[in-house]
Image (cartoon, rainbow, N blue to C red):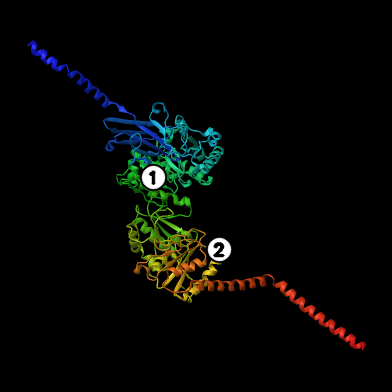
Amino acid sequence: IWVQVSMWRSRLVPLGPCIVAVLAAAAVSAEVFVPHFKWGQTKDKLFITIAVRELERSSVNISFGDDSLRFGASGGSKKYALELEFAEDLEKSKCRWEHLQRPDRWGDAVSATLQKRFPGHWDRLVLDSSSFRKFMELDMTREDDDHEPLKEDVYLIENKKMLLSEAGLSVAREGVEALVINVRHVSCEQCQHADKKFINVATELGQGTDLWKRRVRLAIVDARRERRLVRRLGAVCAPTPVQCRYFVLARGGGDEPGRIRARHDEHHLMEDLRQLGRPQFQPLSLMRSATESERALVVLAIDAPEEARTAAHRMRLYVDIALAEVSELTDLGANGSHVVVRRPFEAAFSSFHGTDLDQWLRVQAVALVANTSTLEDDEPYHDIGLPVARLFVNGSSLDTVARATVRTLATKFEGRVAFVERNATAKSYDWRQHGLPGRFPSFAVAASMEHNATRHAFLEPSYGQEKFWSTAVDTLSSFLEEAIAGQLRPSFSSQEPPDDNLTLPLGAIRTLVGRRCRVLTDASDSEVLVEAMDEWRRDHQDRSLKLDHLAVILARSNITVYRIDLGHNECPPNSIPHVSAGYSGYFFVHKQAKLRGMKVQRLKKNDPSFDRIIKFVAKHSEATFDVNVTIAELDASVHRVLMWRYVETTVSEHAWSVFLGAVGIIVFGVWRCWGRRRKATSVSGLG
């Protein structure tokens, strides 16, 4: 037995080093390594490149936080991890990463592009860089050499009494209906003008004696020092001035921040603050006497869920909010709902039974058919995000029946289309942008309230007839359904097509309008030269004269000349392209171009010489004419007109001088003749 045990012991002895090696390998595999990385930046972005040898692409996992990046991956037999806590904040929703095709000197590379929450140069990447010194380096290929360090914000120094910290937030909200916060960052240049107006209004509020002014308080947050509060408010640097926002923490809204537009004039900001100062979330019995008919009234059940209160709070700039018992809601027609709304200028209440309360409240906050005249009137429709139908009126006898028709449509399309009424005289640019004729009442719809939204004009020859408007509900309903479904061609800014284009004499320039661009470029009966311009071009008079004479010459070759004013007209895509304001562009249209598969030709250079225009026409036209002879004929024709104008101008400017000179010459001649006769008479008398 002893011999057998000894034999087994001798066999086990060599296994010791193997076990140690296995345990060591397991320890190595459990160890997590920090990868090499490099970083660079521009004013708006960070670029971080992470490299791992023998990287397993499928193992890469990257996540972004408000001020952090987490990286994990495997490479060979090793595990890698990197956690970065940044010195400033990010917009994590706009951060992304990708694999790079070319490896880095430290291995296979992954590139992350991170959007800074506020623009500006970062002096450092992370709060504590000591633990990354062996692994981190600066990426000079991604570094912006033109950066400037962030300067001290004088605005914050001058208004330090208004500075708000997260610790003092509760105290700042005490005793007021609404706390309005301006989040300030020195690099947000787009909002600096509005920031100045904010201070002016704050000063006026402090000096005011009106009761509502004591119910509103204004404060400033330093975005660099109060990073957590800034995240809580959701503040970012606005890319344009119209996107600047202030944040509202108000009674009844909990910790949910509302938003209002940062105004660039004090009057409209003061009006917004007056609305925010209205007491909200009070019993319905108290709210009825204080509520005005032009504001919507939202009534919540006392036990309404927090989500309903928050949704109503976000709309408090446009609505009044009341609380009611279940029995009171039932009397208002709630039908089991915990929210009812009375729209502006309406008597009846509507109850909510859908799934998107925020959108429903945005729709109910505006009148069924609102008469809008200012940019501020249009703002709620930007927030709604629905197609906007417009009725244009001009005070005619048909306005009443047209309003009744559109109101019926508004009820039918509630929640799908918003409706507004426009004064055609004051909003002439609006109906022209839709491509409407100058007959009213008229009707159009746009995909949204944005200036570049897709538009559709309802072009009805019988606009001016009462019979049409009294029976137009079905016709306009079909028009709206087709517009919503995307079945209509967009309309473009257009003047009314002229009636005399077909009766003009041969060689006269014809007027092209936006509505006729497609027909001309697709199916013209003759070859066409089009001049696209606007009335602000620098050489308008000279070019107009030369084109008038060139049109007569080209007419002999059956080439028609059109002129379109892009200041009032816009052509559809793939017809006549846009020309920059202040310049003239020239286009050649082939006869029956669409049928023959031919495209519109463009003279590449704007404001070309007329020699070049004639050569351009000769190049593309099927007609044959001598370019040099045509140029000489045009020059001679224009020269004769200019000389005649010069003579007319000279005569008109110096008419009195010429007249007096002529009179003087005549008087002098008469005097000389009289003198000679007198002398002759004297001589004859002496003889």
User: Is residue 309 found left or right of 670 in the rendered image?
Assistant: left
Q: Which residue is mark 2?
A: 539
Give how far apart the Cα atoms at labels 2 and 1 are.
Answer: 59 Å
Q: Amino acid at mark 1?
A: Val
Q: Which mark is residue 298?
A: 1
When asked about the image quadrant of residue 419, the answer is bottom left
Quadrant including the C terminus = bottom right
Among numbered discs 2 and 1, the one appearing first in the sequence: 1
Whole-percent x, y for residue 43 in the image: 46, 40
Whole-percent x, y for residue 23 in the image: 23, 22
Whole-percent x, y for residue 216 in the image: 49, 38
At horizontal 37% and vertical 66% (from top left) the residue drawn is 598
At horizontal 38% and vertical 42% (from top left) the residue drawn is 312
SS at circle 2 = loop
User: Is residue 468 found left or right of 223 in the rendered image?
Assistant: left
Whole-percent x, y for residue 472 in the image: 36, 64
Q: Amino acid at mark 2?
A: Asp
Position of 346 relative to 440 (above/below): above
Mark 1 crowdedness (10 Å alpha carbons): few <14, some 14-19, many ≥20: many
